[in-house]
C-alpha cells in the first residue's frame, strides 16, 4: 500500500541523515522560549496585543484588548488535566515495556524498536548509552511525577472557569511528555538493535544516582506541598468547599522565599533526570526546555504578584531562592 511505502521512504531518509525528531522538537521549543520569552521580558510594552495574549495565560494572562483570532484559539486552562492523563498512560506503557524486557531478559519488541528508530535518528545511528538498570530508575521517577500530576490536576487543583490558555500551550503539553518518555527508552540497552537489557539489581545504582533519587523525591514532595498551599487559598478551611476562584497571595513553605516554588522544584526534578541520563543529548535539551519555560513563567508570575499585591514581600525572589 502507498502509505507503507511512504513510511519506508521516511525511515530511510531519517536513517540516512541521522534526523532525531525528538531532538529537533525540543531544540525548537528552547529557541522559541528563549526568543519569545526574551521579548516578553525586555520589550513587552512594544509588542502587539495579539502576541502578548498568545504568550500569557493563567494569573498573568493578558488583560488588554483581545485579538479575535487569538481568542478563537484559546481553551480552558483546566484542560491541563488532559495531557496528564495522556502522560500517565504513556509513562506506564514505557514502564511496562522496560520491566517486561528486564524480567524476560529479552530485547524490546520489533514495533517498539522500529518506532524508536523512526523518532530518534534511525536504526544505524541509535546506540545504547545507558544500561537498562539506570533507565528503569529514570522511568520509575518520571512515572511517579506523571501519576502525582494526574492526581493533582484531576482531583485536587481548582481551576478558574474563566482562565484560558492558547491552544499551542495545550498542544505543547502533549508533545513534551510524548518526547520525554520516548527519550527514556531511545538509547537504553535492550531498546537498541543488537543489545539486550541488563539484569536489574540495586547494587548497580551508583552513589550519585542514589543522591539524585533522594533529591528528586524531596522535590516531588515539596512541589506537591506548594500546590496544596495554592489550592487551600481557594477553599473554605472549615467545609473544604471552593470559596473563590481568585488568585490570592500564597504564604508559608517555600513561598516565603520564592514566588513559584512549584516551578523551581520542576526544574530540580528534571535536572536530576537529565544527569541520571547524562550520556543522552536529548535529555540535556529536555532539561534546558523545562528550565527556560519554567523560569520565564515564574518571572511573569513574580511580576504579576508585585503589581497586584502592594505589600508583596520584598525578600521573595521569582524562582531561585536568594538569587533570581
Image (cartoon, rainbow, N blue to C red):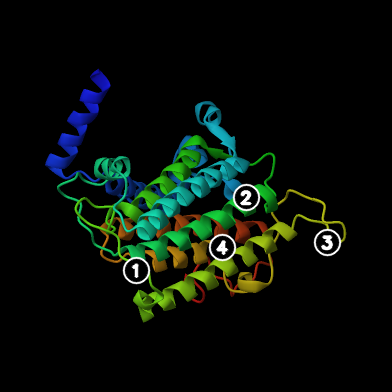
- Residue at 51%, 43% (x, y): give it: 86
**In this figure, which residue is indicated by the disc labeled 4?**
262
User: Distance between the Cα atoms at labels 3 and 4?
Assistant: 22 Å
What residue does disc 3 label? 237
Density class for disc 2 (Cα within 10 Å; few <14, some 14-19, many ≥20) is some
Give the label on residue 253, or none: none
Sequence order check: which comes first, mark 3 or mark 1?
3
Q: Is residue 52 visible?
A: yes
Question: Which picture quadrant has residue 138?
Answer: bottom left
**Where does residue 65 sit, x and y in percent of width and height?**
58, 34
Q: Are marks 2 and 4 in contact (CB under 8 Å)?
A: no
SS of the residue under disc 4 = helix
User: In front of the other: label 3 or label 1?
Assistant: 1
Q: Nearer the viewer, mark 2 or mark 3?
A: 2
Mark 2 or 1, nearer chain start: 2
- Dot 3 alpha-carbon crowd within 10 angstroms: few under 14, some 14 to 19, many 20 or more: few
- Whichever of callouts 2 and 3 sits on the residue coming sooner in the sequence is 2
Residue at 25% from the left image edge and 64% from the top image edge = 279
State the separation of the CA atoms marked 3 and 1.
41 Å
Mark 3 element type:
loop
Q: Name the residue tied to disc 2.
A: 153
Most foreground residue, 31 or 146: 146
Q: Earlier in the sequence, mark 3 or mark 4?
A: 3
Amino acid at each position: 500500500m502507498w502509505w507503507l511505502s511512504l513510511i519506508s521512504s521516511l525511515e530511510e531518509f531519517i536513517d540516512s541523515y541521522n534526523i532525531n525528531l525528538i531532538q529537533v522538537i525540543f531544540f525548537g521549543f528552547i529557541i522559541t522560549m528563549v526568543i519569545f520569552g526574551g521579548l516578553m521580558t525586555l520589550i513587552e510594552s512594544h509588542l502587539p496585543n495579539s502576541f502578548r495574549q498568545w504568550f500569557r495565560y493563567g494569573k498573568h494572562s493578558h488583560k488588554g484588548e483581545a485579538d479575535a483570532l487569538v481568542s478563537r484559539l484559546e481553551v480552558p486552562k483546566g484542560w491541563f488535566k488532559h495531557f496528564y492523563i495522556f502522560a500517565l498512560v504513556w509513562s506506564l506503557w514505557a514502564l511496562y515495556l522496560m520491566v517486561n524486557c528486564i524480567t524476560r531478559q529479552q530485547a524490546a519488541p520489533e514495533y517498539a524498536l522500529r518506532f524508536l528508530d523512526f523518532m530518534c535518528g534511525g536504526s544505524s545511528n541509535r546506540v545504547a548509552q545507558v544500561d537498562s538498570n539506570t533507565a528503569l530508575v529514570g522511568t520509575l521517577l518520571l512515572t511517579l511525577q506523571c501519576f502525582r500530576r494526574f492526581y493533582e490536576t484531576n482531583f485536587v487543583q481548582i481551576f478558574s472557569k474563566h482562565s484560558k490558555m492558547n491552544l499551542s500551550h495545550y498542544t505543547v503539553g502533549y508533545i513534551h511528555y510524548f518526547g520525554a518518555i520516548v527519550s527514556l527508552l531511545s538509547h537504553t540497552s535492550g531498546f537498541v538493535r543488537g543489545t539486550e537489557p541488563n539484569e536489574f539489581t540495586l547494587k548497580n545504582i551508583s552513589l550519585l544516582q542514589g543522591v539524585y533519587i533522594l533529591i528528586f523525591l524531596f522535590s516531588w514532595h515539596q512541589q506537591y506541598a506548594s500546590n496544596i498551599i495554592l489550592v487551600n487559598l481557594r477553599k473554605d478551611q472549615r467545609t473544604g468547599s471552593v470559596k473563590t476562584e481568585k488568585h490570592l497571595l500564597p504564604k508559608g513553605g517555600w513561598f516565603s522565599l520564592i514566588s513559584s516554588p512549584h516551578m523551581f522544584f520542576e526544574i530540580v526534578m528534571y535536572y536530576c533526570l537529565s544527569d541520571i541520563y547524562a550520556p543522552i543529548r536529548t535529555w540535556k535539551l529536555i532539561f534546558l526546555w523545562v528550565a527556560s519555560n519554567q523560569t520565564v513563567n515564574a518571572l511573569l508570575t513574580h511580576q504579576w504578584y508585585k503589581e497586584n499585591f502592594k505589600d508583596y514581600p520584598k525578600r521573595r525572589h521569582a524562582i531561585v531562592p536568594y538569587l533570581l
